[in-house]
Image (cartoon, rainbow, N blue to C red):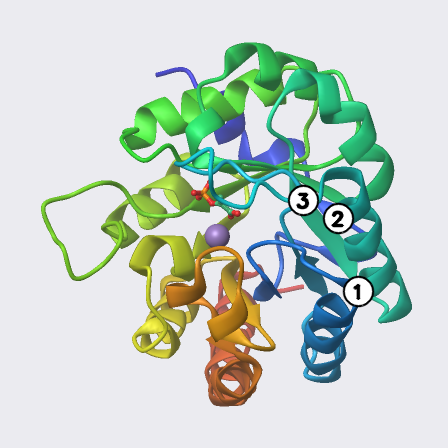
Amino acid sequence: MALYSARKGFNVGLTVGGINLNRGFHIIAGPCSVESAEQMNAAATVLAGHGVRILRGGAFKPRTSPYSFQGLADKGLELLAEAARSHGMISISEVMDTDSIELVAAKVDIIQVGARNMQNFSLLKRLAKQRKPVLLKRGMSASVEEFLLAAEYVLQGNDNVILCERGVRSFETMTRNMLDLAGVALMRRMSHLPVIVDLSHSTGRVDIVPELARACVALGAEGIMVEVHPDPQSALSDADQAMPLDDAVAMIDDLRPWIELRERLDSQASATSSPAV
Ligand code: PEP
Ligand code: MN
């Protein structure tokens, strides 16, 4: 496979809102769906207060059932953007079709393409023609190769692509999807793109997320995505995997020494490998 994204030297880092996503470990957190200003502000206040810099929230929701909450659309984008702005964060939200690219691009800092759209080639080609960074989620039955080739569609015109592993379908019933950490290691070897691991849609639960987050730090991933909610029981989508804010804070606090350890080990390794002057 001739991967354009494997040309590691061709870009030094994907920077958005002053954050270099190719360096360090980034936490993307926020509710599955934007529901209200109160919900977004409650989440943003706690998350920003604990160093989270990227706020998520779906405004156009790809729901399995047409009878489920479909998102607040334009209004949702505004509530997300406002909560992010007033807490010094950057925002990410999903675009589901070519018609709403302009609307989403005007409001958020990073455009998400969901698992169900990973091979929507007309959407990917249109996203290549605009400037906003694109976080591409792995399709639920896509191989690593198919995932990287889908990313190449966006890379044809837009260098700013982030890969997001979110688990693939399997026979396991205790987790929502099967988190493919081997795939993450492969993606990081095969391309220069930052790789974020979505621990909520991959597991469909809250309890095992903190230990998987530690695994992502050790693995070298560029970050994680986690769904959090100020009142998980009332969440209008994905309530079972919505992490309460207190748990999110505990996870972030627990993760900090692991991230610092990784930074220390990485800087020692680069000091010993750099040529003597
Ligand atoms: C989401 O992150 O809001 C989402 C719908 O995830 P996925 O596309 O991975 O199912
Ligand atoms: Mn969700």
Q: Dot 2: within a 10 Å radius of its alpha carbon, few (fewer than 14), some, or many (20 or more) residues? A: many
Residue of label 3 = 59
Residue at left offset 54%, top offset 85%: 256
Q: Which mark is residue 131?
A: none
Is 3 rendered above or below residue 200? Answer: above
Residue 37: image tag: 1
Q: CA distance from mark 2 to mark 1?
A: 9 Å
**Distance Cα–Cα, label 3 vs label 2:** 5 Å
Q: Mark 1 near mark 3, Cβ–Cβ under 8 Å?
A: no
For marks 3 and 2, the one nearer the N-term is 3
Residue 215 to residue 168: above or below? below
Q: Residue at x 41, y 15 (%)?
A: 2
Q: Is residue 132 left or right of residue 202?
A: right
Residue type marked 3: Ala
Where does the image place residue 106, in percent across and percent down from the top left?
A: 86, 35
Q: Residue 233, position in %: x, y?
A: 47, 73
Name the image quarter holding residue 277. bottom right
Classify 12 as above or below 116: below
Question: Residue at left 51%, top 63%?
Answer: 227
Does residue 104 appear to the left or right of 244 in the view shown?
Answer: right
Of 73 and 84, the residue lying toward us:
73
Q: Is residue 228 above or below residue 69?
A: below
Q: Which quadrant holds residue 24?
A: bottom right
Q: Secondary structure at mark 3?
A: loop
Q: Residues within 10 Å of mark 1 (few under 14, many from 20)?
A: some
The residue lying furthest to the front in this view is 67
Mark 2 vs 1, N-terminal side: 1
Mark 1 or mark 3: name the one nearer the start of the chain. Answer: 1
Distance from the alpha carbon under mark 1 to that under mark 3: 13 Å
Can you tell me whether the CB of the residue at mark 2 lies under 8 Å from the nearest atom of ligand 1? no
Q: Secondary structure at mark 1?
A: helix
Q: Which residue is mark 2?
A: 76
